[in-house]
């Protein structure tokens, strides 16, 4: 899927940065800090929203009063079929397929008539690299 609007150099560098950091959840501030004075926050906000609408970027609401986070998703990544773990130290996001999670999902569906939306589920903790 490609973005339907015209391309500019600023949009190109934003998209390239998101692709290069697709294992992380980035805020608009993170992106703006990376580009310093090259790209304004307003441009980033507008373009990120277009990318979200086009399905190239996933938006996560982390908590009340916290900025939204964004993650590039390719058309080959099906975030509805696995779970997401986010490291509180390095901010990396891990895509995990695990039978135990599937068992919990099945249990919630059968016993509580509740279907989990894996694409929006994010579990927080500390990854192995940051623990060492």
Image (tube, rainbow, N blue to C red):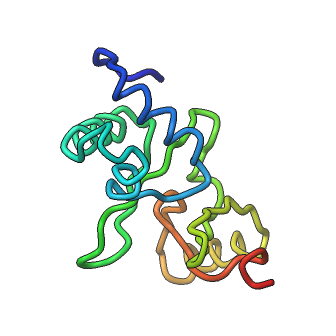
Q: In which quarter of the image is residue 9?
A: top left
Residue 121 location (% of width, % of height): 51, 68
Relative to the observer, which residue lies in front, 96 or 20? 20
Relative to the observer, which residue lies in front, 37 or 31? 37
Q: What residue is drawn where x is 35% and y is 41%? A: 52
Residue 92 location (% of width, % of height): 61, 64
- How many labels, in total? 0
Residue at the far front in the pictured view: 37
Residue at the far top in the pictured view: 6
| On screen, residue 37 above or below 124 | above
Residue 89 location (% of width, % of height): 59, 77
**Quadrant where the image shows the C terminus:** bottom right
Relative to the observer, which residue lies in front, 115 or 118? 118
Residue 37 location (% of width, % of height): 29, 43
Q: In which quarter of the image is residue 76?
A: top right
Q: Quadrant of residue 106?
A: bottom right
């Amino acid at each position: 899927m490609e973005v339907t609007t015209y391309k500019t150099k600023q949009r190109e560098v934003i998209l390239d940065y998101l692709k290069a950091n697709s294992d992380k959840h980035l805020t608009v501030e993170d992106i703006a800090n990376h580009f310093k004075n090259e790209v304004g926050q307003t441009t980033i906000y507008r373009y990120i929203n277009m990318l979200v609408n086009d399905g190239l970027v996933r938006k996560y609401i982390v908590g009340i009063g916290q900025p939204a986070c964004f993650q590039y998703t390719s058309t080959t990544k099906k975030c509805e079929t696995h779970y997401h773990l986010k490291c509180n130290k390095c901010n990396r996001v891990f895509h995990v397929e695990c039978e135990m999670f599937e068992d919990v999902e099945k249990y919630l569906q059968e016993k509580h008539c509740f279907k989990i939306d894996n694409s929006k589920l994010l579990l927080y903790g500390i990854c192995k690299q940051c623990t060492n």
